[in-house]
Structure formats: structure tokens, C-alpha cells
Amino acid sequence: MSSHTGVAGDQPLPPAVEFSKDSRDGVDQVFLRSSQGASALISLHGGQVLSWKTDRGEELLFMSSKAIFKPPHPVRGGIPICFPQFGNRGSLEQHGFARNKIWLVDDSPPSMNQNDSHSPNNACIDLLLRPSEDDLKLWPHSFEFRLRVSMSSDGGLTLTSRIRNINCKPFSFSFAYHTYFLVSDISEVRVEGLETLDYLDNLCHKERFTEQGDALTFESEIYRVYLGSTGTVAVFDHERKRTIIIKKAGLPDIVVWNPWEKKSKMMVDLGDEEYRQMICVDGAVIEKPIALKPGEEWTGRLELSVKVFNVESKEQRFNFGVISAAEEERINSFYLN
């Protein structure tokens, strides 16, 4: 696979989709490059996004230095897909089986609506997961899971999941895009957009609380499920002057997780101090699982973009994705204060 970053002179490169094999586990992977040089790397192991970089080659997703690339072991980092179960909320393995399966490239995906259009300006890959016989023994429901990973010309990353019940009986499931964001230091990070929301605290037996603060900052382990999130969520990294913008559809919940020092030392696939460089903020469906009747389909979409602020010139250095004027003002004021 040839790698590409940046642009050639002043002329944007055409969007690209390239296939290769991962040297660590031999699994097929897909490289997406936007016309402006941003990129993403997706493994067919789990349909998992492993990397998302800006047009300057700056990595936006965390990947553990001790991540285990041996299917079916899950990979610690990137954007694992949790389906049909989140966490240990059920009888299946932690976070369900989708993240541990080898997905197929969907050569003839059905058309999506206009919000998910396969624009010629986008770099895009469609993946497909169907249950194996072993899966059906553990979770006896037939489904088709179609995943589209798309990178817009300005480098925004969109993941669209469509899950259809092709069974003869109803089933329900929970779901999450378990997104590991790379940060300079967890002490320099704040998350906004969750104020006034109720949340379930997994460190307090899933007891329900209401968020009182204007922003989340981090001084210890956190594992919360925020409920009924309908607006934009922003992850501010003060040291890097970088803000990740999270928008979503069909995903009413937001998970915020960092294992902190003690838990990190118990994880074989996470470095002892690596909790400082990561924060998970997941678009999810957890409190009220999705119920599908035979023939019904659910869609969940996650849209990620990034803004980087140049303090000296007091302006954004570059902008991936579209945000509102109010959101832009909030980001600018944060870095100028």
C-alpha cells in the first residue's frame, strides 16, 4: 500500500481507496485518503477504524502501544464497534462479538439516503457482517450489518451502521462506536455538550445522576453513560489547541470512559501510563436497546470533525467538517481565555 499525506503543490489529490494486508496480523485493511490529504485506516478485523489523520499527518485516534493484533482478540484503540451488546450488559462476551469478527467488503451496497451519499468527492468503503453458525448458537438472531466509513473532502470522518433483522422473530441489541481519542494529557482535556443530562455511573452500580457542571474535566477514573444526548459534543484539548466535534444520529447515549492509573495497570493491552493520552467518548444506544421486528432496519451515524486553533493568529489553522457559528465562537473563546 502506498501512503499519502498532504497535497501535491496546490492541486488537491483525488480521493483514494486502497487495499493492503496488515503486517501485524495478515488481515486485509483499507486506506482512505481525502482530496486534501487527510486519511483513515480501517481493518476488516472488526470493521474497526485504526487511524484517522489530518491533512498534516496528525493522528487523532489513540492506539495502545500494547494493542494485540491477533484475531479474534479485540484491538485496544481506534473505533471498535460494540454489537449486539455493550459492556457486560447481557450474556455475551464483553462488548459483543462484532469487533472480533472478520468483515467482508460489501461490493454491492444498497443506496443510502442523501445524508450518507456516496459523493465522488468522498473516499468511502462499505463493509458487511453476517452471523456465523457459532454466532447463532450464542445469539440466535439472523441479521445483516452494513457499515460505511466515509471521509469527506475536508477530512471529516463519518461511520454509518445499518442493521437489518432478516430473522423470523424480533430481536433487540445495544450498540456503541467505542471511540478512543488521542489527547496530549487527560488533565488538559475537557468535554462539553453533556451539561444537565442524566447519566448512569458504572462506578456506582449504574446509579442515576444529573450532570451539574458546564464541562467534564478529569482527575480520576470515569465510566458514565449519558442519556438523551441530542446536541453536539466537543472534546477540547487545551495543550494541542485542538477540538474534536462529535455529531450523531440514531445514537441517544454518550459513553465517557477513562480507566485511570489503577485499572490501566491491570490491562495487558494498555501501557501503565497510556491512560493519560486517551479519552473514550462514544456515540451509543445502551439504556433503551433497539428492538427490530422481522424486516426492520436501524441506522446509527457518527460524524467526527476537528478544529485546530492558532493562538498567535487567533484563528483556526484548518477546519474539518461543518459546525455552527455558535459552536465556532465557543471553541475560539475557549482557547483565547
Image (cartoon, grey):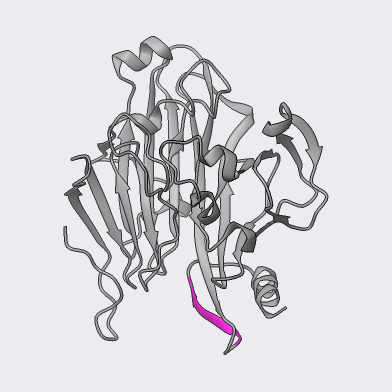
Say if 164 sits above or below 217 in the image.
above
Residue 277 in the image: x percent, y percent? 51, 56
Say if 284 sits above or below 337 in the image.
above
Q: Nearer the viewer, residue 144 or 113?
A: 144
Give the tally of numbered discs.
0
Q: Nearer the viewer, residue 294 or 60?
A: 60
Residue at 43% across, 57% down: 157
On screen, residue 174 versus residue 119, left or right, reads: right
Q: In this view, which residue lies farthest toward the top?
A: 137
Q: In the image, which residues are magenta? A: 314-319
Say if 52 sits above or below 26 in the image.
below
Residue at 65% across, 71% down: 331
On screen, residue 98 versus residue 84, left or right, reads: left
Q: In this view, which residue lies farthest toward the bottom?
A: 313
| Res. 258 image quadrant | top right
On screen, residue 276 versus residue 29, left or right, reads: right
Residue 245 covered by magenta stretch: no
Residue 203 in the image: x percent, y percent? 69, 33
Q: Is residue 167 visible?
A: yes
User: Which quarter of the rendered picture does the C terminus lie within?
Assistant: bottom right
Residue at 42% across, 69% down: 154
Q: Is residue 250 visible?
A: no
Q: Nearer the viewer, residue 41 or 261?
A: 261
User: Which quarter of the rendered picture does the N terminus lie within?
Assistant: bottom left
Residue 64 in the image: x percent, y percent? 41, 48
Residue 17 in the image: x percent, y percent? 24, 57
Residue 318 covered by magenta stretch: yes
Q: Main secondary structure of the magenta part?
A: strand
